[in-house]
Amino acid sequence: MIFGNLAKNLSGKQFDTFWSNIRKCNNNKVSEAVNTINGCSGNLEIFEMWKKHFAALYNSVDDKGAKDTLLQRILQHQDTEDSDTYVINVQDVASYCSKQKKGKAIGLDGIAMEALI
């Protein structure tokens, strides 16, 4: 019966009603969140599985010396400024935070970029 109503909504170009009914159908089928993935059970094991996966993924690409280049530039800056440390001030942080995208997922620190901005 529900599929007949969905078809009727589509043929009558009642798209809002159609999608509303689709959401209702989908919500009725949801009973519980997934608790086992790839043999890992529970939030902690699933978290560790994804952590290892993405660590391997992110470390699988050579940075082509980008880290060394950055460290070299920092050392050059220190040499020209006659300083033993690289200073980051509040204005630097504010400037870079204002350039970040908003509305993105929070990281492992649990802090949204909007909170820093």
Image (spheres, rainbow, N blue to C red):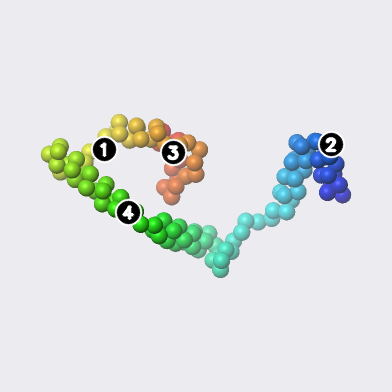
Whether the residues at callouts 4 and 2 have beta carbons within 8 Å, the answer is no
On the image, the x and y values in percent for residue 56 come to 42, 61
- Which dot, 4 or 3, sits closer to the camera? 4
For marks 1 and 2 on the same chain, the one whose residue lies earlier in the sequence: 2
- The answer to whether 114 is drawn above or below residue 66 in the figure is above
For marks 4 and 2 on the same chain, the one whose residue lies earlier in the sequence: 2
Residue located 32% across and 54% down the image: 64
Amino acid type, callout 4: Lys
Amino acid type, callout 3: Met
On the image, the x and y values in percent for residue 52 come to 44, 62
Residue located 47% across and 36% down the image: 102
Residue located 23% across and 44% down the image: 73
- The residue beneath circle 3 is 113
Left/right placement of residue 79 relative to residue 55 reads: left
Whether the residues at callouts 4 and 3 have beta carbons within 8 Å, the answer is no
For marks 4 and 3 on the same chain, the one whose residue lies earlier in the sequence: 4
For marks 1 and 3 on the same chain, the one whose residue lies earlier in the sequence: 1
- The residue beneath circle 2 is 12
Q: CA distance from mark 1 to mark 3?
A: 19 Å
Q: Secondary structure at mark 3?
A: helix
On the image, the x and y values in percent for residue 95 come to 34, 32
Q: CA distance from mark 1 to mark 4?
A: 26 Å
- The residue beneath circle 4 is 64
Can you see residue 55? Answer: no
For marks 3 and 2 on the same chain, the one whose residue lies earlier in the sequence: 2
- The residue beneath circle 1 is 88
Label 4 crowd bin: few (<14), some (14–19), many (20+), radius 10 Å = few
- Which dot, 3 or 2, sits closer to the camera? 2
Q: CA distance from mark 1 to mark 2?
A: 62 Å
Q: CA distance from mark 4 to mark 2?
A: 58 Å
| Quadrant in the picture for residue 58 | bottom left
Q: CA distance from mark 3 to mark 2?
A: 44 Å
